[in-house]
Image (tube, grey):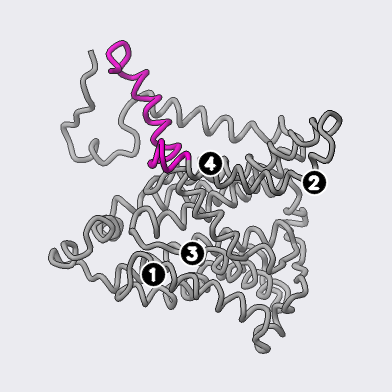
Amino acid sequence: MESGIFHTTYQRDMALRHTPAQWVRLALVVAAALAFPFAANNYWLTLANQIGIAAIGAIGLNILVGFTGQISLGQGAFLAVGAYSAGILTKQLGIPWYASTVLACLITAGVGAVFGMPALRLKGLYLAIATLAAQEIIEWGILQWEPITRLTGGVEAMNVPRPTLFGVRMNTDFNFYWVTLLCLALTVILAVNLFRTRTGRAFVAIRDQDIAAEVMGVDLFRYKVLAFAVSSAFVGLAGALTAHYRTIISWERFTLETSILYLAMIIIGGLGSVSGSIYGAAFMTLLPAILQNLGRSLGGTVPNIAQQIPFLQQGVFGLVIILFLVFEPEGIAKMWRNVKDYFRLWPFSY
């Protein structure tokens, strides 16, 4: 009877997958992801692209909040920096969309590092307020500060050239699915391996007890700022992908509501879990779509239900967060882990 997972070498202990069942599940996920676009219509491909982009941003936020313990309410602002950076570089300077995406990640990382500097002195609620200030400052700069509004267009939407590769238009639902899937796969690989390194372990040590981490020789200022930079780089990637996929950038996509939405994704998916970020992004993206479809199906029997859908979404949104915090604080990732443990240990799963 299986009573645990034991390793005899450090190499096996550091492996990303420890059992044959884990490799089988990974192979099934990869096969499903590769086969999905050939079986899905444009509606489901659009949802899949939205989930993929949201998952990249959620992983970036989870690195900061879930793994490093630094609360952030500025996700929408950093998404805006990535989106507008990619749009300006492509539209104004003629840089190819794939190069502007990489540069947008670096620019967003730099902006995130600047706004992460107060993290040395602030923590908890005070740090959350500081990142909220970053959200408001960046939003104000995009809309009101003349040197920036000349590039962004202020309150007017910015049109971004359609991305092409070897003459093929890439922002169709089918073609962009592969771009999103590749970026998500790279993000997952980088994030998972980050916490197998000295830097990742320093992030976790800061989250668990920053004073003890400093006593052990962890440079708090360096690693806190680095956590903001790494997190913002992934968020900038999500913003750049949004710009190239939609080809229209509007500040309304990057408000405080967006920051709260991403925070809800990692809470529901599971703090400190890369896979949980994907689960949370999928859940929070599919939930409005399910409610909208439900409203259409009930339109004939329940009058004026369509007008109530936005308010219903907000109510369900808050209720779901409360239920997860009360009954499963570790999110969907913990629920899925419980299911796997049940079948792995059956019939002695108790």
Mark 3 vs mark 2: in front: 2
Kindly identify the amino acid type of the residue bearing the numbered disc 2: Gln
Q: Mark 2 points at which residue?
A: 307
- The residue that appears at 53% across and 54% down in the rendered structure is 262
Tell me where the magenta segment starts and ends, as one range: 323-350
* Image disc number at residue 320: 4
**Distance Cα–Cα, label 2 vs label 4:** 21 Å
Residue wearing tag 3: 73
At 24% from the left and 55% from the top, the residue drawn is 208
| The one of 232 and 88 positioned closer to us in this rendering | 232
User: What secondary structure is marked by label 4?
Assistant: helix
Left or right: 34 with respect to 204?
A: right
Closer mark to the observer between disc 2 and disc 1:
2
Q: Which residue lies furthest to the left in this view?
A: 215
Q: Could you say which disc has been placed on residue 127 in the image?
A: 1
Quadrant in the picture for residue 137? bottom right
